[in-house]
């Protein structure tokens, strides 16, 4: 079993007006740090994720969002890094 700690501050705001209403667009930005706390050198092998996305509030219950996510982490003791760029498409409903 792995225990992973995550810290993810996020900022989202509407692009029209002061609040997000149905059929309006919004911008979402996130930065996330992950670490496996019980492994050797947990902070050395932490992962950083950056995300920026554009979304649409379809109605009171549904949101559709798409954006780019960049992931970065050390892959070995020599300090070599693994980089990934992902396209994210998210449908949220409540």
Image (cartoon, helix red, strand yellow):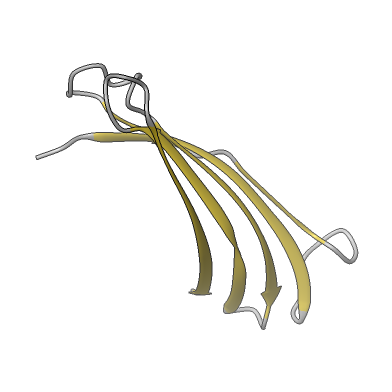
Of all residues, the one furthest to the top in this rendering is 41
Say whether residue 63 is left or right of residue 86: right
Location of residue 94 in the rendering, given as x and y in whole percent from the top left corner: 49, 74
Q: Give the residue at x 18% y 18%.
A: 40
Say whether residue 25 is left or right of residue 51: right
Towards the viewer: 59 or 26: 26
Q: Give the residue at x 45% y 38%.
A: 72
Which of the 4 image quadrants contains residue 83? top left
- Does 32 appear above or below 60? above
Location of residue 68 in the rendering, given as x and y in whole percent from the top left corner: 59, 59
Q: Give the residue at x 70% y 75%.
A: 56
Of all residues, the one furthest to the left in this rendering is 1
- Does 77 appear above or below 20? above
Q: Assign the N terminus to one quadrant of the image.
A: top left
Say whether residue 3 is left or right of residue 48: left
Towards the viewer: 26 or 82: 82
Location of residue 31 in the rendering, given as x and y in whole percent from the top left corner: 56, 40
Q: Give the residue at x 17% y 23%.
A: 38
Towards the viewer: 88 or 11: 88
Of all residues, the one furthest to the right in this rendering is 17
Count numbered badges in the picture.
0
Which of the 4 image quadrants contains residue 64? bottom right
């Amino acid at each position: 079993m792995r225990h992973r700690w995550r810290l993810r501050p996020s900022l989202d705001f509407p692009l029209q007006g002061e609040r997000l209403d149905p059929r309006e667009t919004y911008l979402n930005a996130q930065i996330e740090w992950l670490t496996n706390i019980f492994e050797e050198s947990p902070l050395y092998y932490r992962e950083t994720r950056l995300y920026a996305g554009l979304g649409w509030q379809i109605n009171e219950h549904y949101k559709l969002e798409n954006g780019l996510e960049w992931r970065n982490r050390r892959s070995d003791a020599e300090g070599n890094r693994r980089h990934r760029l992902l396209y994210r498409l998210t449908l949220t409903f409540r």
